[in-house]
Image: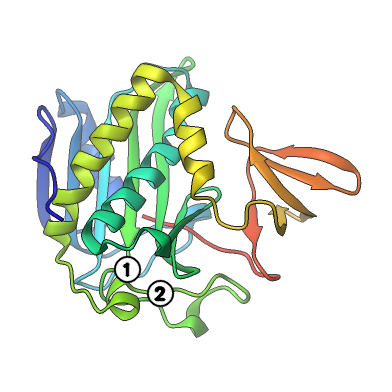
């Protein structure tokens, strides 16, 4: 299926090599008059969640959407769900395989149960206001990390090429992702989080199943019941219903790391 046209009013910066697209977004943000996508062929210092190194071989997808949001920081942070849905939309459009892609709380896209992509949100602000938001996205288009290099027990990494046989160029992926994000962003801006939350839950991995959530040294087990209106993970545990705003989720005893 072909992608929709590039969204009006959104700039595009394609670079050969950067330290990380999120870092470049932070440098460019003060000079931007509107939203922009920054894509790099290679990252020399890609970052994941909690500062983890994010391997960035050429041929995979590394891009950041940078914008100047107007909402409170709590609402701005919900764009991780907007980005996840847009990323899944793009994958489905390019492959025609809707059943193969699912969403892992808080910010990963899975393909056939393996980790295909991660999302990293970073913001700069002061006085309770977010000056700019960078939504970093990394997708294993042609290569996935060696499982031996991944945190023990993590969801297995996979690539789009390895799982589907499809070779998608990073520029073509961005051509599909940018309009997909624009559509999801328009819904979020106009209608709030509720429709985004409902759509995300429709594609959530392990919904209604036992999972474990780790926050620091605290590990909680329970049934993944839902995501609440604040974006928190809701577990049904033996101690009762618990809302967890931030954690790493374990599937089959493993945790996962996400990045840009």
Disc 1 designates what residue?
140
For residue 158, the mark is 2
Label whose residue precedes the other's in the sequence (1 or 2): 1
- Give SS at disc 1: loop
Question: Residue 195, position in %: x, y?
Answer: 46, 28
Identify which residue is drawn at 75% across, 52% down: 223
- Give SS at disc 2: loop
Say if residue 17 shows up in the picture: no
62 shown above or below 228: below
221 displayed left or right of 63: right
Identify which residue is drawn at 25% across, 42% down: 180
Q: Nearer the viewer, residue 60 or 149?
A: 60
* Residues tagged 1 and 2 counted as in contact (Cβ below 8 A): yes
Question: Residue 98, position in %: x, y?
Answer: 36, 58
Question: Residue 133, position in %: x, y?
Answer: 35, 32
Within 10 Å of disc 1 (Cα), the crowding (few <14, some 14-19, many 20+) is many
Cα distance between the residues tagged 1 and 2:
7 Å
Say if residue 31 shows up in the picture: yes
Quadrant showing the N terminus: bottom left
């Amino acid at each position: 299926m072909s992608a929709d046209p590039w969204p009006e009013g959104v700039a595009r910066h394609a670079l050969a090599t950067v330290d990380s697209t999120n870092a470049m977004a932070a440098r460019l943000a003060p000079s931007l008059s509107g939203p922009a996508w920054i894509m790099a062929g290679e990252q020399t210092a890609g970052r994941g969640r909690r500062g983890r190194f994010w391997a960035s071989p050429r041929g995979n997808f590394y891009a950041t959407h940078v914008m100047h949001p107007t909402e409170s920081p709590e609402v701005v942070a919900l764009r991780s769900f907007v980005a996840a849905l847009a990323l899944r939309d793009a994958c489905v459009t390019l492959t025609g395989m809707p059943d193969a892609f699912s969403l892992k709380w808080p910010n990963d896209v899975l393909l056939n149960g393996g980790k295909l992509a991660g999302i990293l949100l970073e913001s700069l602000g002061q006085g309770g206001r977010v000056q700019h938001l960078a939504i970093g996205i990394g997708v294993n288009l042609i290569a996935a990390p060696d499982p031996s290099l991944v945190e023990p027990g993590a969801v297995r990494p996979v690539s789009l090429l390895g799982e589907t046989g499809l070779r998608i160029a990073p520029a073509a992926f961005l051509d599909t992702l940018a309009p997909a994000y624009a559509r999801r962003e328009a819904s979020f801006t106009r209608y709030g989080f509720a429709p985004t939350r409902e759509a995300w839950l429709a594609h959530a991995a392990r919904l209604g199943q036992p999972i474990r959530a780790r926050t620091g040294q605290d590990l909680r087990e329970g049934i993944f019941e839902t995501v609440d209106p604040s974006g928190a993970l809701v577990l049904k545990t033996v101690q009762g219903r618990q809302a967890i705003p931030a954690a790493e989720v374990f599937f089959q005893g493993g945790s996962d790391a996400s990045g840009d």
